Amino acid sequence: MAERTVIELDTVRKAYPDGTVAVEGLSLAVREHEVLALVGPSGCGKSTTLRMVNRLVEPTSGRILLDGEDVTRADPVQLRRRIGYVIQNVGLFPHRTVESNIATVPGLLGWDRRRTRARVAELLDLVGLPAATYAKRYPNELSGGERQRIGVARALATDPPVLLMDEPFGAVDPEFRRHLQTEFQRIQRETGTTVILVTHDIDEAARLGDRIAVLSRGGHLEQVASPLAVLAHPASERVRDFIGDGSASRMLALARVQAGDLEGADRIVQPAPAPVRLGARLTDAFEAVAALPGSAMGRVPVVGESGDVVGSLTADGILGALRRAADAAASDEGIQDAVVADAAP
Ligand SMILES: Nc1ncnc2c1ncn2[C@@H]1O[C@H](COP(=O)(O)OP(=O)(O)O)[C@@H](O)[C@H]1O
Ligand SMILES: [Mg+2]
């Protein structure tokens, strides 16, 4: 099935009035229903790129299309109704309550009070801030992380078809960030919202992105590919630098146990250890193998959907699965030479 392009940047350039070229020659297509994680070091032009899409910043040259329509010709107010936006550093209205902040876009769209109130309560629940406690508070009565969660709730209020998120989880403490990421992923899959997620955190990008676009300074696109492909086959030294260490373990968390990775069930030592599921993350399979008693000879049973044992897996098998996943990601992206050895520790 051919994916529809929802947002297209065509050789976009942004030079700020002081002469800073934040973005140059950037071409990028965002597909319908995908989460495109836009990553890169601080100052590389991520926020500028995002802000050009909803016209908070005007491109100096090039074109940006939303559903095929040039956004520079669209009415900015209409545009922002179609695009949810979570701002870096939140940007809540300080003199409005939490409730009224979240209700901003519903208000613009003329929702009635009951519908708005119900939606606000639902969203507050979603981000873990119950309405009874938080609805009437003002932004200065919230912690940084709480403000950020309100920012996420506000952007989701009317289920916009496109969502732009600029480091949305940055100020949230690590434990709750994980929870918000999981919730975000669940909502995104349910609603099919097309998302550009800006982050400088490669782990967040790998976890949430269907594809990752890596920018270097000046808004230069270094690579756009699936998380596995970026990790296994960084397209340039800059991408490699940005990713840093730990590609193999990140890939283990992304790739899944597949039938072709298994060896026979007949080699499992009895009594059989606790099994791994087919489709489990390789990380979980690795944890299971590492936790085996010596008597199990390094082999875990693997069970299918029905719970029946369908084969077995060893540490070698997991490494093979990792290579297989990296090669598959490479061939999906049309990358010729498999260089997974570079990514292994
Ligand atoms: N309003 C502005 N005027 C001048 N330069 C700016 C402005 N906003 C951002 N920049 C510069 O543009 C570059 C890219 O910034 P930004 O898009 O915020 O990067 P990122 O979000 O990747 O950290 C940086 O060098 C930054 O200093
Ligand atoms: Mg930024």
Image: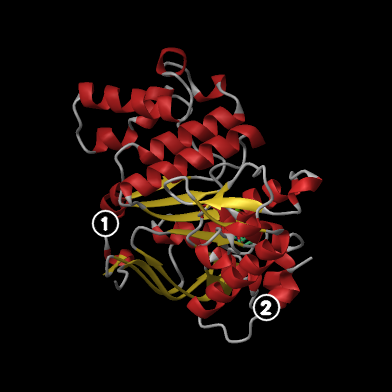
Q: Which residue is drawn at 25% across and 37% down?
A: 108
Q: Quadrant of the N terminus?
A: bottom left
Q: Quadrant of the C terminus?
A: bottom right
- Image coords of residue 139 (percent x, y): 51, 25
- Compared to residue 189, the image places residue 237 above or below, namely below
Q: Where is residue 186 in the image (x, y as percent from the top left)?
A: 42, 42
Say if 15 sits above or below 314 in the image.
Answer: below
Measuring 66% from the left and 37% from the top, which residue is drawn there? 174
> Mark 2 = which residue?
236
Going from the N terminus, do you reach mark 1 or mark 2 first?
Answer: 1
Residue 267 in sight from this viewpoint: yes
Which kind of residue does numbered mark 1 sit on? Asp
Residue 92 visible to the viewer: no
Residue at image coords 63%, 64%: 44
Residue 291: x %, y % from top left: 74, 44
The 10 Å Cα crowd at callout 1, few under 14, some 14 to 19, many 20 or more, is: few
- Judging by the rendered image, the residue that carries numbered circle 1 is 75
